[in-house]
Amino acid sequence: MHDPLLFALMVLTLLATPGPTNTLLATAGAASGWRSAFRLILAENTAYLLSILTIGLMLGPVIAAIPALGLGLRVAVGLYLVVVAWRLWQAGATEVARVASLVTPAQVFLTTLLNPKAIVFAVAVVPFDRPDVIAYLAAFAGLCALVALAWIGIGRTLGVVAGRAGHARLIPRVGAAGIGTFAVTMIVLPLVR
């Protein structure tokens, strides 16, 4: 993707698409507000860049040569997301304040590091063949931060509305359902193909 405008549009579209990382960001925004959720942005950005660089420069060719490895990675990521969803669901059964302690920078980092969107970025979006690839990666980081802020804001707004309506415990459960859906999709789809 050599056109900067097309690159930006593709990055924004992919990052804005609901997924496990965005669900965690929104859940954190809903449960703990802006200040606590801001620290998650650096974790997401670092994980995406690390994953994109690793896949784009090293792992991509190996996965292309050994498709079973890619299948195994998807199933492993799906199982990890099942654990994340279970923990969020359990937090909804107890208290919403516990969700803030569950959605940590480490958890966002690991979830993002394993996010399948990184594969798309590494293989089809980031132009590793260009001498100015660093500029594209810097633009990616900025766009990633903007989209993360938007998801945190969406979560915060929903959290305030749910809290006022007396349904604050639904927030972690909705997040768990979203992440659980992504987990099942990641596990089942590769196995049916």
Image (cartoon, helix red, strand yellow):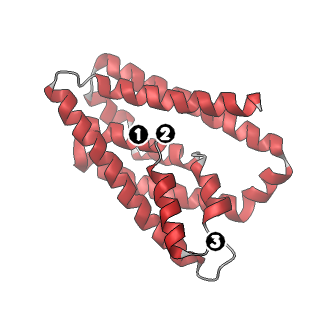
Q: Residue at x 32, y 54 (%)?
A: 149
Assign the C terminus to one quadrant of the image.
Answer: top right
Question: Nearer the N terminus, badge 1 or badge 3?
Answer: 1
> Closer to the observer: label 2 or label 3?
3
Drawn side of residue 58 relative to residue 92, left or right: right
- Kind of residue sitting beneath label 1: Leu
Dot 1 alpha-carbon crowd within 10 angstroms: few under 14, some 14 to 19, many 20 or more: many
Drawn side of residue 78 relative to residue 28, left or right: right
> Closer to the observer: label 1 or label 3?
3
Q: Residue at x 49, y 72 (%)?
A: 5
| Residue 145: quadrant of the picture | bottom left
Q: Residue at x 23, y 40 (%)?
A: 157
Question: Nearer the N terminus, badge 2 or badge 3?
Answer: 2
* Secondary element at image label 3: loop
Drawn side of residue 115 relative to residue 176, left or right: right
- Kind of residue sitting beneath label 3: Pro
Of 187 and 124, nearer the camera is: 124
Assign the N terminus to one quadrant of the image.
Answer: bottom right
Residue denoted by label 2:
20
Q: CA distance from mark 2 to mark 3?
A: 25 Å
Residue at the limit of the structure toward the right, as seen here:
65
Dot 3 alpha-carbon crowd within 10 angstroms: few under 14, some 14 to 19, many 20 or more: many
Of 35 and 117, nearer the camera is: 117
Q: CA distance from mark 1 to mark 3?
A: 28 Å
Place of residue 26 in the rendered image (x, y in percent of width and height, measured from the top left):
35, 41
Of 171 and 38, nearer the camera is: 171
The label on residue 24 is: 1
* Secondary element at image label 1: helix
Instruction: Assess whether mark 3 and mark 2 are in contact (beta carbons under 8 angstroms).
Output: no
- Kind of residue sitting beneath label 2: Pro
